[in-house]
Image: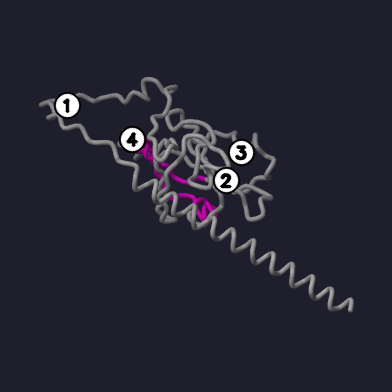
Amino acid sequence: MRRKILIGGGLLLLAAALLLAGGNFLEADRAALASEQVLQQMEPPAPAEADPPEEPEEVVPAYVLNPDMEMPETEVDGHRYIGVLEIPALELELPIMSQWSYPNLKIAPCRYQGSAYQNDLILLAHNYSRHFGQIHTLEPGDTVCFTDADGTRFMYEVSLVEQLERTAIEEMESGDWDLTLFTCTVGGAARVTVRCQQTDDNAASR
């Protein structure tokens, strides 16, 4: 009798685990679809149609003159986005929400803090397979691109991939990194953290 009870309990636990895994897969699929739909609705800024002068003068972007300025935002379905993140090595193109919250993270990656204009942008996302679930596979030298809502491109290169304790908030926020991406490991015991620096190509994009 005891053996039957143990076997029955084991089957119940297995069934519960399968249901949980299935729920996680469904949530990840919904998040991937939500991000794709947002990208389709984010219209790129229209290029200026004015004729160029005979001797074009170099225009200094506003954020260079005022790096403390707020990053521009675009609104889609009631949510505000600061731009688009591209990670070619992972074949990812993702909209980035302006402010993070747990409900927002189920739609798209979010800004945790910082600004591309001040070289301290930190982005976070769930470890869904089509969000940040594969960033642990990135290697030094891989390219990352962030395009703000005005169409300005910021080019980065992965410098370091590290794993930090879940409680190491100050360590995750510290360091002289132009861009940081992070997500939880499976189970949430630690954080995968990708550190990036701007590349020389970024100057040309401005």
Quadrant of image for the N terminus = bottom right
Nearest-to-viewer mark from 1 and 4: 4
Residue 193: x %, y % from top left: 57, 45
Identity, as a three-letter code, of the amino acid under mark 2: Thr
Mark toward the start of the polypeptide (3 vs 4): 4
Mark toward the start of the polypeptide (1 vs 4): 1
In percent of the image, x 64 and y 64: which residue is there? 19
The residue that label 2 is drawn on is 193
Colour scheme employed for the rendering of this structure:
one colour
Spatial distance from mark 1 to mark 3, Cα to Cα?
43 Å
Q: Residues within 10 Å of mark 3 (few under 14, many from 20)?
A: many
The kind of secondary structure element at disc 1 is: loop
In percent of the image, x 60 and y 33: which residue is there? 174
The kind of secondary structure element at disc 2 is: strand
Mark toward the start of the polypeptide (2 vs 4): 4
In percent of the image, x 10 and y 26: which residue is there? 54
The residue that label 3 is drawn on is 172
Q: Is residue 190 above or below residue 11?
A: above
Q: Which residues are magenta?
A: 131-159
- Evaluate if marks 3 and 2 touch, with contact meaning CB atoms under 8 Å apart: yes
Q: Is residue 198 above or below residue 89?
A: above
Mark toward the start of the polypeptide (3 vs 2): 3
